Image (cartoon, rainbow, N blue to C red):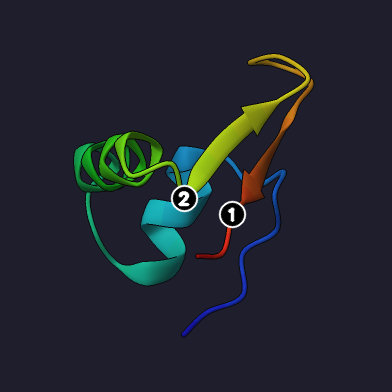
Amino acid sequence: MAYISGKTTIPEMAKKIGVTERAIEKNIQKLKEAKLLERMEGRKGGYWKVHEE
């Protein structure tokens, strides 16, 4: 698994792991719905917080 920081952009993630940007967006949405991922401090200047079960 590749390490990706909380400030990594969707295009950077897609390129690093070899999938489309849309695939990243879909997976982010699934993780948010499962309450495992949360965007903190706004869309532009924020970061992703991962919640562990």
Residue linked to disc 2: 36
Q: Nearer the viewer, residue 32 or 9?
A: 32
User: Which badge, 1 or 2, is on the more N-terminal residue?
Assistant: 2
- Residue drawn at (37%, 54%), measured in percent from left and top? 14
User: What's the amino acid at mark 2?
Assistant: Leu
Badges 1 and 2: C-beta atoms under 8 Å apart? yes
Label 2: how many residues lie within 10 Å, few (<14), some (14-19) or many (20+)? some
Residue 49 location, x and y as percent?
Answer: 67, 45
Label 1: how many residues lie within 10 Å, few (<14), some (14-19) or many (20+)? few
Q: Quadrant of residue 47?
A: top right
Residue 28 location, x and y as percent?
Answer: 36, 42
- Residue drawn at (29%, 41%), measured in percent from left and top? 21
Q: Nearer the viewer, residue 5 or 53?
A: 53
Disc number for residue 51? 1
User: What's the amino acid at mark 1?
Assistant: His
Q: Residue furthest front?
A: 53
**Mark 1 element type:** loop
Q: Residue furthest bottom?
A: 1
Residue 3 location, x and y as percent?
Answer: 62, 75
Please say if 51 is above or below 16.
above
